[in-house]
Image (cartoon, grey):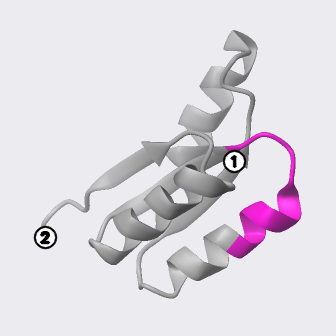
Amino acid sequence: MAARKVVLITGGGRGIGAASVALAAKAGWDVVFTYAGNAERAKTTEAAARAHGGEVLAVRADVGDPASHPRHLEEGA
């Protein structure tokens, strides 16, 4: 069985980050993305990316806060 490609995108809840999530999902990658606080927007991004068939996980995390780094890496593993 071939290993699936996984990408971690920070700031994936909106704007360029959300577009990157969609592009990665369309290209066949599984996606883990972080978002800062708008859970509704992150759910919308997550659902849109899932429509392309891959696994998608949204994790609330502040990449500017080193204490949150292990959490999004562990949840995405």
Q: CA distance from mark 2 to mark 1?
A: 27 Å
Question: Residue 70: percent from the left, percent from the top?
Answer: 62, 23
Q: Is residue 70 above or below residue 48?
A: above
**Quarter occupied by the N terminus:** bottom left
- In the image, residue 43 above or below residue 6: below
**Amino acid found under the numbered disc labelled 2:** Met
* 16 to the left or right of 39: left
Residue under numbered circle 2: 1
Look at mark 1 in the image and give the residue it sits on. 59
Question: Viewer-proximal residue, 23 or 57?
Answer: 23
Across and down, in percent, residue 34 comes to 64, 44
Q: Residue at x 53, y 46 (%)?
A: 76
Horizontal relation, residue 65 to residue 7: left or right: right
Magenta residue span: 35-44
Image coordinates of residue 71 in percent, x first then y, are 67, 31
Q: Quadrant of residue 69?
A: top right
